[in-house]
Amino acid sequence: MSYTGHWKIIINSPMGDQESFLALTQSGNKLTGTQSSKFGSGNIANGVVDGNNARWSIDITQPFAMTLEFSAQIDGSSISGTVKLGSFGESRFKGSSA
């Protein structure tokens, strides 16, 4: 399976459910792309794929400046995992290919 593609995810954050969109490209064990939401968009950083698992981070400035650190798994057209929300702890997310 590959992370390459477009994904719509819902992050269960302390501020309620937050919709986000991923445009990912997997090349070997490297993961690149962009992530966007109502708070803005940016390039993902530190993207690594290990089998069915992936990790990446993105720096955001809205609604608070912080680095979001994602850990994900894919299963067919579904994606899920956790995201560390800076000092706000960790939340779960899930989504599907868009």
Image (spheres, rainbow, N blue to C red):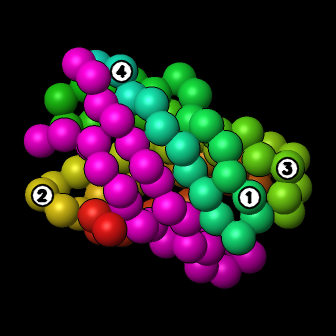
Q: Amino acid at mark 4?
A: Lys
Amino acid carrying mark 2 in the image = Gly
Examine the rendered structure and indicate whether residue 41 appears above or below residue 42: below
Q: Which residue is mark 1?
A: 40
Mark carried by residue 30: 4
Front label number (2 vs 1): 1
Q: Residue at x 58, y 28 (%)?
A: 45
Magenta range is 1-28
Q: Nearer the viewer, residue 30 or 25?
A: 25
- The quarter of the picture where the N terminus appears is top left
Residue indicated by mark 3: 61
Residue 82 drawn at (x, y percent): 47, 52
Q: Is residue 90 magenta?
A: no
Residue 51: image quadrant is top left
- Calculate the distance from the C-alpha at mark 1 to the C-alpha at mark 4: 24 Å
Residue 62 shown left or right of residue 4 in the figure: right
State which tag comes first along the sequence, 1 or 4.
4
From the viewer's perspective, tell me whether residue 34 is left or right of residue 25.
right
Badge 3 vs badge 1, beta-carbon distance below 8 Å: yes
Give the answer, above or below, for where 2 lies relative to 40: above
Q: How far apart are the two marked residues, 2 and 3, measured between alpha carbons?
A: 32 Å
- At 35% across and 56% down in the image, what residue appears? 6
Q: Are marks 2 and 3 in contact (CB under 8 Å)?
A: no
Q: Residue at x 18, y 62 (%)?
A: 77
